[in-house]
Image (spheres, rainbow, N blue to C red):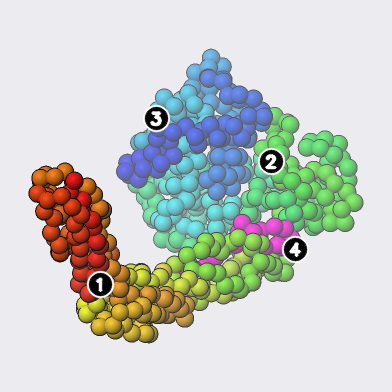
Amino acid sequence: MKIPLIKAGILTCLTISLFSGNASAESDLAAKCAAYGTIQPNVNPSFQQINCLLTNAALKADIPPEVVKAVATQENGSWKQFNSKGDPIISYDGGIGLMQLTNQNGYVEEKLKNDIVYNIEAGVAVLDYMYTRVDLPKIKGAGRHLIENWYFSVMAYNGTKPVNSPLKQQTGERNMDAYQEQVFAKLEKESYLDGTKLAQYPFSKLDFDYNRESSENIKFNRLQYTLASNGHETAYLFKSGNRVETTAKGVNLRKKPGGTYLKTLPKNTALIITGGFTYDNSTANQFVWYPVQTVDKRVSGYVSSAYIKKLVDSKKPVISGVVSKSIPINSKFSPKTGVKAMDNADGDITSAIKVMGTVNTKKKGTYYVTYTVADWSKNTAVVKRKITVYDHVKPVISGAANKTIRLNSSFNPRAGVTARDNVDGSLTSKIKISGFVNTKKKGTYTLKYTVTDSSKNAVTVTRKITIDRTKPVISGAKSKTIRYKSSFNPKTGVTAKDNVDGNLTKKIKVTGKVNTKKKGTYTLTYTVTDQSKNQAAVKRKIIVK
């Protein structure tokens, strides 16, 4: 393959994203084809294994495998990476290995030569890049699965040079020697067994500007085409349950892939796919085999992908599990959980459901989610769903604990009290208080704090405020006996503590005296008063002996 140089930055980024420092893409591809053997260094895998590698590399890149196989056939008809000596196959113009990659910045040349999986992945990546180019024509309304829509991508794989012009400039005749024409001819022969002809583009000489004597690329004056006949979608995307129909007369239903005939099916016979495809046991066939059964389910067998296409129907799929529902705020919500889509022809197409609209579970409100799914016949079902996010979480009031305060002190019932809500945030200013506190009169008063959030969730906290009526406590004033003429301080070891005022030791007053020079019994009275006028008194006997 002698393709034109692509901007190094673009291709390097493409290459790095696929291959840099990580062989997972390669090992995954090899693992999918492990049933056909282990890939050995510098040894060509079997035809079936390469068929499997090319197919899975194409499917992973969302490219019709028929196209990738035809390109590989055009580049290397024998599907070989190595010659008989085990050396990498290098063409006269520098094309390397199976996919004949040349002029490629960013790829590891030694791996292109010696690693067939890497070589295939690289070739598929280049072909995929060609499809993304906006300067190449496409078929109006067509997507990646339509084989004919890859015509110009295949052309660019080899080069958009005058030699590959779809038409001969002088005569306007179809240029059957063009690279892409040769590739698509091989595709018809190998994937359709010459039983099907691909749709033709309505080319005009005015569509292409180029100088036959120049090496400059062709300029495309027309970037969109409409085909006169139906195109052909890849036959590799059928799933179990899909309905297909035969495309030719006398299609053989076989007992096993490539095996004996069970039945000959007329054209347009409806069949149901019953499993994934498998590869042909022959060393020559590129197509695959699908297990199928007749619609009446009386006969089952295998049919070649070369002779089936999707059965077109007009019935819309059915989306289920999309009932409207209410969910609590901050809960988890996955829009696809429990949602399914079934089609009469394609079976389960749940994975094809597209969801529009979002649900913010962190914000209460009503949200609408739209589910859309289309079957292979483009029949589309649309269902709208209402999701209500509600808030049943009450606000939280903090700082409204019971407390005791002094008589005649200042008291603000809102001081230190806050309210916060999971949705509304601070609701402190919305707190309502019922009840009162008379700080000039001892007793216990009850206050009620109530706050309501925007979702009408209300909370009430009851708080008791006690005007201090608890006496201080005097400690250490026990009666005791002391020696005659000893030293005695009546306040030593005596303390006073109050539930509100704290340490009142310094405020203790002592009445009575003790004469240590005269034996006898003396009585002392200890008195202390807190700021709420609560007074404690303790009598103490001191015996001088």
Q: Quadrant of residue 106?
A: top left
Could you say which disc has been placed on residue 58 in the image? none
Question: Would residue 176 appear left or right of 406 to someone viewing this image?
Answer: right
- Mark 2 packing: few (<14 Cα in 10 Å), some, or many (20+)? many
Instruction: Give the amino acid type for the residue marked by disc 1 in the picture.
Output: Asn
Q: CA distance from mark 2 to mark 1?
A: 103 Å
Query: Residue 241 vs residue 86: left or right?
Result: right
Q: Is there a contact, CB below 8 Å, between mark 3 and mark 1?
A: no
Q: Residues within 10 Å of mark 1 (few under 14, many from 20)?
A: some
CA separation in Å, label 3 and label 1: 93 Å
Residue 287, disc? 2
Q: CA distance from mark 2 to mark 3?
A: 31 Å
Q: CA distance from mark 4 to mark 2?
A: 27 Å
Q: Mark 1 against mark 4, which lies toward the viewer? A: 1
- Judge left or right: residue 100 versus residue 297: left
Name which of mark 3 and mark 1 comes first in the sequence: 3
Residue at 55% from the left image edge and 35% from the top image edge: 28
Q: Which mark is residue 108?
A: 3
Question: Which residue has dot 1 on it?
Answer: 534
Q: Is tag 2's residue or tag 3's residue first in the polypeptide sequence?
A: 3
User: Depth-wise, is mark 4 or mark 3 nearer the camera?
Assistant: 4
Q: Is residue 15 above or below residue 358?
A: above
The magenta stretch is: 341-360
Of marks 1 and 4, which one's residue comes earlier in the chain?
A: 4
